[in-house]
Amino acid sequence: MASSEQKPLPVPSLEKAPEKYDDEAEEPTGPANIAETLEKLREEPLVREQNLKQMRDWIAKHPHIRRCRTDARFLLRFLRAKKHSFMVASQTLERYLAARMIHPGWFQRLDIRDPELSHLADIGFIYPLLERTADGCKVTMTDWGLLDPKQYTIEHSNRMHILLAEAYSDDPLVQCAGAILIFDLKHVTLAHQSIVSLSVLKQVAKFINNGLPLRCQGVYAVNVPAGAMWIVNGLVSFLHEKIRSRFAVFHDFDEFTKERLDRQLLPKEYGGKVSKSEHMKAFREQCELYRDKMLALDEMEIDLDHNEPYSRHAMLDDIEGGAVGSFRKLDLD
């Protein structure tokens, strides 16, 4: 949990090939099974060091990446999410950078002091829970019906989710143990459905599938109105099978907590121990702590306006399709 007394974190270099790389990265600690988790990720000191060097050499020589973080905390997001496969991690980094260029409304100005983002944080639209699961997973709650369709669009929802992801993605335990996403759809109305389309859901799924450096351990929809099931089914239909297999719908939180999550982790309003306001407060403090770092991300850049086959229109297509790959063969010696 961030403390209001903590100082803002330093902004990392965005130079492709800085004179000195920032290798300061904390080791994940906490869960009793952390050693088992690291083994699943194929994380060993020598492998990590070699992969960081390879990622940095690849970024430095990439003809279209112009500015990008190269510090260990940032690159380990991708390596850990992809179990230290350089090939897949580098593809995911390309897609992440591309998504930032293609969808600026999702990624730019992730500022908790922005009036719209601040208001959505204040009403508890989205926030992470203070306690993690026994395996160390970070759990996030989204009360999607709190998004006023007269004032906000689906883009505001995407932006809030990216804000939360960026605020916690340098956390080594988040990188290693992953996250669980809970969507409470109790307050969703027909008006909310009017701001959602299958084309937008497909765009969101493309980023989740190919550009999101996160170990997604579970996605759960609870209290889904019958009329809103098409939104849930639409999004899930576009997701890769691996993520789809970790998705489930529950009638209510009694059923959900009986089958999937310790109820004590939830806010007091859902039957847990700590009030929702405390979870929300901690989220705002984390966003303040990382504010300068997140705003600096706006300066990262990859050139998508060139004539090679993997440029703008192909960039977020399925990784399995091989649309990207031109620079996997760069000489990294």
Image: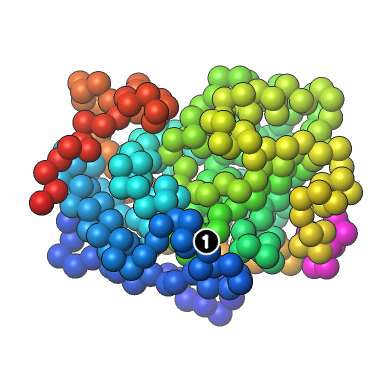
The residue that appears at 45% across and 50% down in the rendered structure is 81
Tell me which segment is drawn in magenta: 266-274
Of residue 105 and residue 39, the one placed in the foreground of this image is: 39
Image coords of residue 183 (percent x, y): 72, 42
Residue identifier under label 1: 37
Image coords of residue 272 (percent x, y): 83, 63
Name the residue type under label 1.
Thr
Of residue 302 and residue 251, the one placed in the foreground of this image is: 251
In this rendering, the answer to whether 8 lies above or below 151 is: below
Q: Secondary structure at mark 1?
A: helix
Task: Specify how the rendered protein is coloured.
Answer: rainbow
Q: Is residue 49 magenta?
A: no
- Magenta region's main secondary structure? loop
The residue that appears at 53% across and 64% down in the rendered structure is 36
Name which quarter of the figure residue 27 lies in: bottom left
Q: Is residue 267 magenta?
A: yes
Kindly tell me whether residue 203 is visible in this rendering.
yes
Image coords of residue 91 (percent x, y): 33, 39
Kindly tell me whether residue 114 is visible in this rendering.
no
In the shown orientation, is residue 314 left or right of residue 28? left
